[in-house]
Amino acid sequence: MKQWSVLPRVLIVLTVLAFFTGCGGNGGSGESVVLSSSGDALKMRFAAFGDLQIGTLQSGNASCTNIPQLRQTIIDCAGSDPVPEITFLNGDMVLNMIKDDGEALKTQLDAWQQLYSGLPDAGRSQLLPIPGNHEVDFEDLALNAQAPNPGAIDQWLLWFVRNGYDFAAGNGPTPAGSNPDSLARDESKLTYSFTRGVTHFTVIDTDVLTTKTDATTGLVLSGWIAINWIEEDVRKAQLDPSVSEIIIVGHRPVETPSYSTDSPGIINTAEYPLADRLSAVMSSNSKVKLLLVSHCHAWDARKLNNGAGVWQVIVGNAGAPIQEGWNPAGGVYFGYSLIDLYQSGKIVLSNYGRALPPSPQKFYEDSPVAPAPATLRETLTI
């Protein structure tokens, strides 16, 4: 990585009595506004991490999530100053991938929610889970292919609403009218957008249930996005004078690292070059600053289009089996990212990590060595 800068280490807390415009939850009357050493006010902090499923069924863990790593990441995020306003969970929190009516997913999600709700620091940051392929797809082993599962999508939405995670959802695309995105169902709470302060978030479902099928398998295509709706949403936010920056959040990346050949991203087809169009709409709208995804079990930051596009940051090292071929300096690690948005327009992304348990302890076990608090690995300034 070449374009790193060092995050200012000194933070000065200034109490303001007057209302600080555009600071979301960090700048109301009588609240604390965090300044960098250069005096640049922090508008918002949010966190992101993805991919917690442990890749196997484990006795005593109905969620199939990496419990020790989830617990420690929630503790770490809650202990940051300030606490993140929103925490995005970028998908693949459970294992699923079963071809059924969604009952396997329901069991795992309910177990995950019971686990998360019991954590002492749960709720200090507003959690916003995003579905990944492990939540909404099934795997056909005979065809060696994945496809969206309508029953699993139904169960995801029921769980999503029941637990209050739909606080920002509901304005997304539907199949009504001309349906240019070839949607097979209402997507309004799966792909959607919201504005917090002066920051516009576009949340995308990267495994939309489409009417298009793969000619080689006969299955519905996976890795599909509602690109026409996304393009229009981003263009509207670009023209909105009250919006300072646009952040796009999802599960599958546009581009995957060279070592991640087994983790394909958003698909391109001859008729629907979805990844290329998403990359183009981000590049052609100057307020789009960041694409935040996971899916690859690694941490990776790169500018799209051979360095000419926007930053894509993969935060897929939350607790799933580490991606083969990922070889960061100092060894592989689990972790999360904090994203700080400043009044000047600067965005600082801080990548935190903790070492995996020593062999022969399994990566999802917390004994005999429990996860340590994560430490700052590197920063990226946008």
Image (cartoon, rainbow, N blue to C red):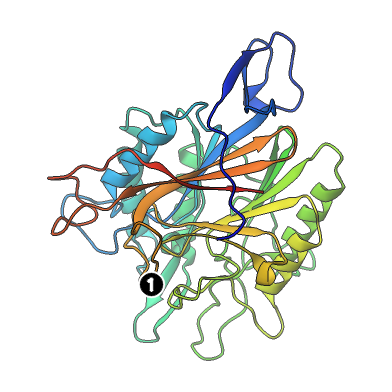
Tell me the quadrant of the picture where the N terminus can be found: bottom right
Quick one: 368 or 205, which is closer to the camera? 368
Report whether 332 appears left or right of 147. left
| Above or below: residue 84 compared with residue 178 | above
Residue that badge 1 annotates: 325
Counting from the top left corner in percent of width and height, residue 279 is at 70, 67
Report whether 184 appears left or right of 298. right
Report whether 211 appears left or right of 377. right
For the question of whether residue 33 can be seen, the reply is: yes
| Above or below: residue 100 compared with residue 380 | below
Quick one: 298 or 52, which is closer to the camera? 298
What is the secondary structure assignment of the residue under circle 1? loop
The picture quadrant where one finds residue 361 is: bottom left
The amino acid marked with disc number 1 is: Gly
Query: For the point 31% across and 46% down, which residue is it?
Result: 69
Counting from the top left corner in percent of width and height, residue 70 is at 34, 44
Query: For the point 34% across and 60% down, which residue is it?
Result: 95
